């Protein structure tokens, strides 16, 4: 089986079970919170067609080395990672041929990732090989300060285990039928526990998360509307405000539990924890506020690293 060593922690090798026919695998037992990959993005662009002229989204030219790396990425389902072929160089005509750069456009469409911490879609060389799981063991983020794609483990992995991320960072609550339809882009059938053995329970939890989010929004709107009447009916409205905060906190606490049960230890979980901490503070419980803020910080460090601007901002709020 063809393989390429990425670093001390990872190896890239062929895998029929992976979304793109190849994946990143652990070379040893690795603990959660470890950054297993850090690489410069090959390309940042709002539209893949922007790169058909050999330019980045900011207008700068792609280097020959970047073009060589792009040429080694698959342009669609069933196509191999050329990095596993052993060829030293590939003709750039494979990207800019008679088709006017159509292969380059397809390569970017197929391999670009949308990351919660990035303003635009990005293409990374090794991150393009990272396979999908609806209950992933890693989180992919973009660090604006260093302009790198960083891959952190949110669960510990054993030697030989594949590293997976969610291709739907911003839409983790969608049911399996929706996820399966979206994965058709890669002609990939997810076989994680959430899509197989635990399908019914997983769908029930994710549908409940979506319902609770809707209920939370409605409660928050109602609370704000009642707050406008405080000047007229201060005592009654003040009591209602407490009730609304309690109901909001109950909603968010249940969402947090469902997300943990689903293994969704991503950036979204930190936002929910911070929201819950705010409700605890409004109820006068500073101890619960601090506990949830600290847990949010731990998970954010696990997803983004301790030096990411977002992590430092949250740490400063707790200090």
Image: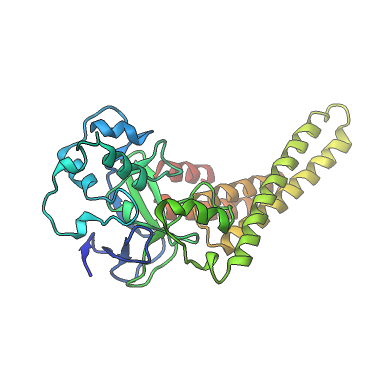
Outermost residue, front side:
98
- Coordinates of residue 149 in the picture (x, y in percent): 33, 47
Q: Quadrant of residue 154?
A: bottom left
Q: Quadrant of residue 4?
A: bottom left
Confirm whether residue 27 shows in the render.
Answer: yes
Q: With 42 as the anchor, is 189 left or right in this view?
A: right
Confirm whether residue 294 shows in the render.
Answer: no
Q: Nearer the viewer, residue 280 or 73?
A: 73
Q: Quadrant of residue 41?
A: top left
Task: Give above or below for 127 relative to 192.
Answer: above
Q: With 14 as the anchor, is 92 left or right in this view?
A: left
Q: Residue at x 79, y 28 (%)?
A: 228
Q: Residue at x 20, y 56 (%)?
A: 83
Q: Nearer the viewer, residue 202 or 15?
A: 15
- Coordinates of residue 88 in the picture (x, y in percent): 11, 53
- Coordinates of residue 132 in the picture (x, y in percent): 42, 58
Task: Give above or below for 91 relative to 194.
Answer: above
Q: Residue at x 78, y 32 (%)?
A: 225
Q: Nearer the viewer, residue 229 or 176?
A: 176
């Amino acid at each position: 089986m063809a393989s390429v060593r990425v670093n001390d922690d990872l190896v890239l090798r062929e895998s029929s079970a992976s979304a793109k026919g190849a994946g990143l695998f652990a070379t040893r037992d690795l603990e959660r919170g470890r950054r297993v990959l850090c690489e410069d993005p090959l390309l940042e662009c709002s539209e893949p067609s922007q790169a058909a002229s050999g330019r980045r989204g900011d207008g700068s030219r792609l280097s020959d080395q970047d073009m060589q790396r792009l040429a080694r990425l698959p342009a669609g389902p069933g196509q191999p990672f050329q990095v596993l072929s052993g060829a030293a160089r590939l003709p750039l005509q494979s990207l800019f041929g008679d088709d006017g750069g159509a292969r380059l456009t397809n390569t970017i469409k197929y391999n670009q990732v949308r990351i919660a911490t990035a303003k635009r879609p990005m293409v990374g060389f090794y991150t393009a090989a990272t396979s999908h799981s609806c209950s992933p063991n890693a989180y992919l983020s973009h660090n604006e300060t260093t302009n790198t794609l960083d891959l952190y483990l949110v669960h510990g992995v054993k030697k030989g285990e594949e590293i997976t991320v969610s291709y739907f960072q911003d839409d983790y609550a969608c049911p399996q039928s929706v996820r399966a339809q979206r994965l058709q882009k890669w002609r990939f059938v997810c076989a994680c526990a959430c899509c197989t053995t635990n399908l019914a329970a997983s769908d029930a939890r994710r549908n409940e998360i979506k319902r609770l989010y809707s209920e939370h929004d409605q409660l928050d709107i109602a609370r704000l509307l009642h707050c406008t009447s405080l000047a007229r009916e201060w005592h009654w409205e003040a009591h209602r405000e407490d009730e609304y905060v309690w109901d909001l906190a109950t909603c968010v606490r249940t969402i947090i539990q469902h997300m943990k049960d689903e293994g969704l230890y991503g950036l979204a979980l930190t936002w929910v924890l911070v929201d819950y901490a705010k409700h605890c503070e409004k109820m006068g419980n500073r101890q619960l506020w601090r506990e949830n803020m600290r847990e949010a910080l731990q998970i954010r460090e696990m997803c983004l690293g301790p030096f990411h601007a977002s992590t430092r901002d949250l740490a400063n709020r707790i200090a």
